[in-house]
Image (cartoon, rainbow, N blue to C red):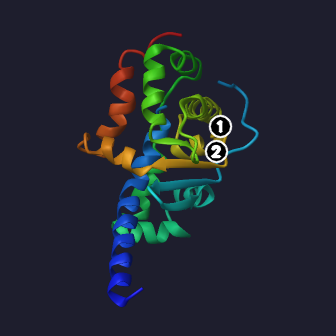
């Protein structure tokens, strides 16, 4: 490979990494919107950001460390540097809670509107290389319900990952970007998946 080809290849990889960095927080933020009622035998250890043949994996332990301390380590250091995001801002996003009643949420996910929401999310996140709805949809349901039972409070991205019943959760970057292009902000994206369809249902009596 000539020097010119190497430069082009490195530039292309750098651009892809920047895109992955910019979408990392967004991808994780939607995981809280998506059953079993017992903790899963396993939890996600890595989040794989995938675009075609390009793949970067983030350790869930590193994400949890960032959420707890506001400091990045591992690959997160490079991702935040390239995307020019502050670690404390991403930590805030990872710690953002969705206040969802456990019993009502469990019932809601078995309804038609619940199934529509979960299937939207399942086009973007699923067990690594297994996007089939019969696998991805139950995985999201388990992550949401079991995540709500971790400690007190609502569901966060970290709790979801700690309850996700697969070692590696894939984030489909092209699918994510297709949705992001329709939203004006991260908050608008979260609203697209959760708040709007659930208005009037979150506060309903079980």
Q: In the figure, 142 relative to 113: above or below?
A: below
**Residue 110 drawn above or below residue 174:** above
Q: Say how many tags the image has.
A: 2
- 1 is higher (above) or lower (below) than 54: below
61 vs 76, left or right, is right
- Looking at the image, the residue that sits furthest to the top is 205
Which residue is under mark 1? 150
In depth, the one of 184 and 130 nearer the eye is 130
Q: Residue furthest bottom?
A: 3
Is there CB contact under 8 Å for labels 2 and 1?
A: yes
Q: Position of residue 19 (x, y in %)?
A: 35, 60
Residue at 55% over, 34% down: 132
Query: In the picture, residue 199 is in which quadrant?
Result: top left
User: Residue 163 occupies which quadrant of the picture?
Assistant: top right
Q: In this figure, which residue is indicated by the disc labeled 2?
A: 162
Q: Residue at x 38, y 78 (%)?
A: 10
Q: Which is more N-terminal, label 1 or label 2?
A: 1
Mark yes or no: residue 202 visible.
no
Q: Is residue 78 above or below residue 38?
A: below
Residue drawn where x is 64% and y is 48% of the image: 44
Q: Quadrant of the C terminus?
A: top right
- Local packing at callout 2 (Cα closer than 10 Å; few below 14, some 14-19, many 20+) is many
Q: Is residue 71 or residue 18 the one in the foreground?
A: 18
């Amino acid at each position: 490979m000539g020097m010119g080809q190497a430069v082009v290849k490195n530039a292309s990889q750098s651009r892809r990494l920047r895109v992955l960095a910019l979408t990392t927080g967004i991808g994780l933020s939607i995981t809280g919107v998506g059953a079993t009622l017992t903790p899963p035998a396993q939890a996600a250890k890595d989040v794989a950001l995938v675009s075609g043949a390009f793949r970067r994996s983030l350790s869930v332990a590193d994400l949890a460390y960032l959420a707890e301390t506001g400091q990045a380590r591992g690959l997160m250091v490079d991702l935040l540097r390239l995307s020019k995001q502050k670690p404390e801002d991403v930590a805030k996003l990872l710690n953002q809670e969705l206040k969802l009643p456990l019993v009502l949420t469990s019932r809601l996910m078995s309804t038609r509107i619940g199934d529509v929401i979960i299937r939207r999310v399942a086009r973007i996140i699923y067990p690594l290389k297994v996007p089939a709805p019969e696998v991805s949809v139950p995985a999201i349901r388990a992550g949401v319900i079991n995540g709500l039972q971790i400690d007190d409070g609502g569901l966060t991205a970290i709790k979801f990952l700690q309850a996700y019943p697969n070692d590696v959760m894939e984030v489909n970057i092209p699918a994510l970007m297709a949705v992001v292009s329709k939203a004006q902000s991260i908050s608008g994206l979260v609203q697209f998946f959760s708040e709007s369809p659930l208005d009037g249902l979150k506060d309903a009596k079980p």
